[in-house]
Amino acid sequence: MGNALTVIAALTSVAGAIVTALLGARFERRRHLEQRQQERQDHTDRYSGPLLAAASSLASRLRNVMDTDQIDEFTSADDQHSQRYLDYAVNETLYRIGRYLCWVHIISREIRVLDLGNEERNRELVLRLGAVQHATSSRDGDLTFMLLGGEQWALGELMVDPDRPADDPRCISYVRFADRLDDPRFARWFQSLKQDIATYLQNPTQAKPRLTAITKALDDLVALLDPRGIWVPFDESIDAQRTLDTRKDRRSVRRTQRQTKLL
């Protein structure tokens, strides 16, 4: 009887050890999986957030650029501040273009593609990034604001902050960008875009199809990166258009007031 109890106790102990080992291994695998998922999410957030902000910001600016009334305000001869506003608009537009290309460059260089959780969304990300690149580099129609693929890559590379650690790349700030425009070696890469802006101000109609295509591609990219509209509202483009309409009404009133004063 004593031997039987000893055997049972031993078997129970062994069984308990086996169960503990199996559960431990299972919990460890689950912990490791959760850790990898968290690391993947952190890695994705680290790059998708800045890319989302850059894409949304550029799309918003392009919508403003296509507002002819705003162009008239910047270029009006009777406004003593128009040159200041125009210089700012040109440089800040160049910065938004460069910042977007910078984050595309960083993503392509560092991790190739973002991991959005499944192959279908990853594939869609590549397609939408490609759509923006194609809309920008296409040689169909008017060539104003056209940037070839290599030029886009070069601008993106120039915008990477050289003082950041290699494992934590970031885009340079607007202040640093504005300062570097005084460096001919840096500024020459943006010269064609700057000339395109001057051309566009003289004849906005010709370049509008390209700008519209780029804006649409950027909006599609934003919708993929922020599908629930948490960071960028779904109706941003609608709100932007309403804002433009409101500006038009206000400018119309101001022009009428100026004309009345002249009379």
Image (cartoon, rainbow, N blue to C red):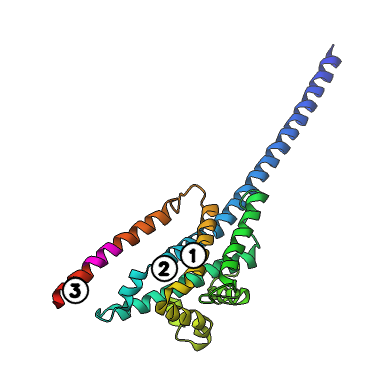
Q: Residue at x 32, y 81 (%)?
A: 83
Above or below residue 103? Residue 201 is below
Q: Residue at x 86, y 16 (%)?
A: 3
Name the residue tied to disc 3.
Answer: 258
Q: Residues within 10 Å of mark 1 (few under 14, many from 20)?
A: some
- The answer to the question of whether label 1 and label 2 lie on touching residues, with beta carbons closer than 8 A, is yes
Q: Is residue 250 magenta?
A: yes
Task: Find the magenta span and give its range.
Answer: 248-253
Query: In the rendering, which numbered label is found on residue 104?
Result: none
- The answer to the question of whether label 2 and label 3 lie on touching residues, with beta carbons closer than 8 A, is no
Q: Amino acid at mark 2?
A: Met
x then y, percent, for residue 210: 52, 69
- Earlier-in-chain disc, 1 versus 2: 2
Q: Secondary structure at mark 1?
A: helix
What's the distance in space between the residues labelled 2 and 3, CA to CA?
A: 24 Å
Q: Nearer the viewer, residue 256 or 59?
A: 256
Quarter in which the N terminus is drawn: top right
Q: Amino acid at mark 1?
A: Thr
Q: Amino acid at mark 3?
A: Arg
The answer to whether residue 250 is left or right of residue 58 is: left
The answer to whether residue 79 is left or right of residue 46 is: left
- Earlier-in-chain disc, 2 versus 3: 2
Quarter in which the C terminus is drawn: bottom left
Q: Residue at x 62, y 76 (%)?
A: 150
Name the residue tied to disc 2.
Answer: 66
Q: Nearer the viewer, residue 185 or 135?
A: 135
Name the residue tied to disc 1.
Answer: 212
Above or below residue 193? Residue 226 is above
x then y, percent, for residue 110: 63, 65
Q: Residues within 10 Å of mark 3 (few under 14, many from 20)?
A: few
